[in-house]
Amino acid sequence: MSLEERTYSLLLVSASDAFNEATEKLLTTGKYLPFITVKSISEAKRYVTQHTVDLIVINSPLPDDAGVLFSVDCCKKTQAVVLMLAKSDAIQYIVADVSEYGVFLLQKPVARSAMQTALLWMASTRERLRITENKKLSLEERMNEIKITNRAKYLLISVKGLSEPEAHHFVEKYAMDKCISKKSAAEEIIKLYS
């Protein structure tokens, strides 16, 4: 599925009504759904703890905080891609704190075309994170399968007196004979010999 076909949830953290209206006009394609606007970092924190968000745009500063720690926390603890907008005098201080965590920075005022490009970069980065997330899940599933298979082999070694290669062959043959996965075979063997 291409980037044009995907939709991304977007959280806009901004206290500026003018900026919020301009951003909302920019996001009329239906590509960013749901599109939620909050006006403080504390509201943003509450929202992020209760919802999964793909993209976060922070128009710094906000009434309760600049948003630096929030942006870093979001990059460290969630799969969200974060863009922080700040004035030129603030960017030089912010860049050192956020860049190593993958927070994107743009200097205000932001041209419409620059914002569109930034949103495209964010979507692209979110897709990259999604691929990594899927690989991680499949790796965890594979490790779980290995753990269960090893437990079944250990039971076969201790109960039936088989060697490790014989136990391994037994699990594979059991799976083939029953037309089930190796993991299911190992689970059945564990039930049978426990």
Image: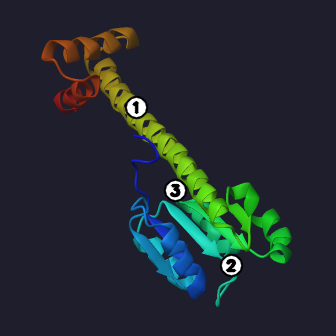
Instruction: Say which residue appears at 21% left-offset and 18% top-offset.
Output: 175
Q: Which callout, 2 or 3, points at the residue further toward the start of the chain?
A: 2
In the rendered view, tell whether residue 63 sits above or below residue 73: below
| Residue type, mark 2 in image | Ser
**Residue 148 point in image, percent of width and height:** 33, 32
Quadrant location of the N terminus?
Answer: top left
Residue 103 has which mark?
none
Residue 23 position by quadrant: bottom right
What's the CA distance linking mark 2 and mark 1?
43 Å
- Callout 1: helix, strand or loop? helix
User: The residue under label 1 is which amino acid type?
Assistant: Arg
Q: Is residue 167 left or right of residue 49?
A: left
Q: Are marks 2 and 1 in contact (CB under 8 Å)?
A: no
Q: Which residue is drawn at the image coordinates 29% and 20% (left, top)?
A: 156
Q: Along the line of sight, which residue is nearer the eye, 73 or 83? A: 83
Which residue is identified by label 1?
A: 142
Mark-to-mark CA distance, 2 and 3: 21 Å
- The answer to whether 47 is drawn above or below residue 149 in the figure is below
Could you classify mark 1 by the number of other residues whose Cα lies within 10 Å: few (under 14), some (14-19), or many (20 or more)?
few
Q: From the image, state whether disc 2 or disc 1 is nearer to you.
A: 2
Residue sitting at the far left: 178
**Dot 1 and dot 3 residues touching (CB under 8 Å):** no
Residue position marked by numbered label 3 in the rendering = 79
Please name the residue shown 47% across and 37% down the image. Answer: 135
Whether residue 65 is visible to the viewer of this picture, yes or no, is: yes
Q: Amino acid at mark 3?
A: Gln
Residue 60, which numbered label? 2
- Residue 30 appears in which quarter of the rendering? bottom left
In the figure, 186 relative to 138: above or below? above
Which of the two labelled residues, at mark 1 and mark 3, occupies the earlier sequence position? 3
